[in-house]
Image: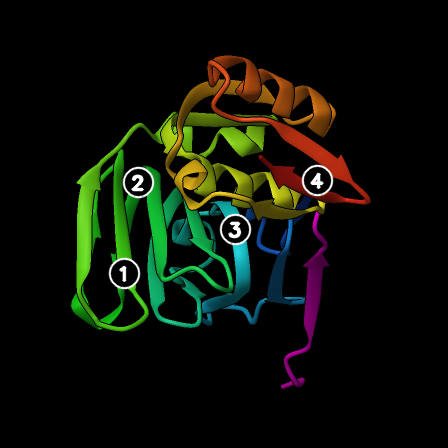
Amino acid sequence: EKEQLYNYLTIPRGGQFFVKLSDGTEVWLNSESKLKYPIVFGEGLTRKVELIYGEAYFKVSPSTMHKGAAFHLLTKSQEIDVLGTEFNVKAYNGDTTMATTLVEGKIKKGTLSETLIPNQQATISHESDKIDVEVIDVSQEISWVKGLFSFNEKPLEEIMTVLSRWYDTEVIFENAKQKKFVFTGILERTKAVEDILNLIEATSEGQLKFEINDKTIYIK
């Protein structure tokens, strides 16, 4: 028996990456994310991968192809037992909750044993063990994998958090009321940040004005 060796894959702000694990599982990593995974999975042993922080989309190779070996995803607040499925996990540092969204298949969530079905999202607070499950539009949640920002009546504070990770910028609100401005739209991640901000500004009817100075976005 050889010692289990691990890779650590760190994606910086402004980056995105795809990796195929040794069992054939496909993983897309969003910006500002870190994944720990075995260089080679032990034959017949539970396949354990850890999302240290950030966001990742998994297309898991089913256990039937690996002598029944289960696939477990660890995060800082839970362990997810995956049953051959596609799912998205968002667990950024600084977020008060972690969200798991199921696209296809089944997923179990640790000792609480919440079983999700497709188009459901489970959120868990870091401060309690309570899990909230709701039906959502999965295409919105995984739009980043397809190179899109998809915002459906999202507050500007949440939108700017997403944009700052992708464009590697800091954000300063000059008025707290601006954080609650609601925006809906689907935007391409390949566009320059100036283009994205101009589109949001154009819908604000004069409520917002963006200025960029040395990688800092000021919202006036």
Outermost residue on the right side: it is: 214
Q: How crowded is mark 3: few (under 14 residues within 10 Å), some or many (20 or more)?
A: many
Q: Magenta residues, as a range?
A: 1-13
| Quadrant, the C terminus | top right
Residue 66, percent across and down?
A: 47, 57
185 left or right of 26 in image: left
Image height of 197 relative to 219, above or below? above
Disc 1 on helix, strand or loop?
strand
* Residue holding disc 1: 124
Q: Separation of disc 4 and disc 1 at Cα?
A: 28 Å
Image quadrant in which the N terminus is located: bottom right
Q: Which of marks 3 and 4 is nearer the N terminus?
A: 3
Q: According to the image, what is the colour scheme of the structure?
A: rainbow
- Circles 2 and 1 in contact, beta carbons < 8 Å: no
Q: Earlier in the sequence, mark 3 or mark 2?
A: 3
First-in-chain label (4 vs 1): 1
Seen in the picture, residue 31 relative to 73 is either above or below; the reply is above
Mark 2 or 1, closer to the camera:
1
Q: Nearer the viewer, mark 3 or mark 2?
A: 3
Instruction: Identify residue for label 4.
Output: 167
Which sits in the foreground, 60 or 10? 10
Type of amino acid at the residue the image marks with label 1: Ile
Label 2 or label 4, whichever comes before in sequence order: 2
Location of residue 13 in the rendering, given as x and y in whole percent from the top left corner: 70, 50
Alpha-carbon span between mark 2 and mark 4: 33 Å
Q: What residue type is labelled 2?
A: Gly
Tell me residue 35's x, y (percent).
Answer: 60, 62
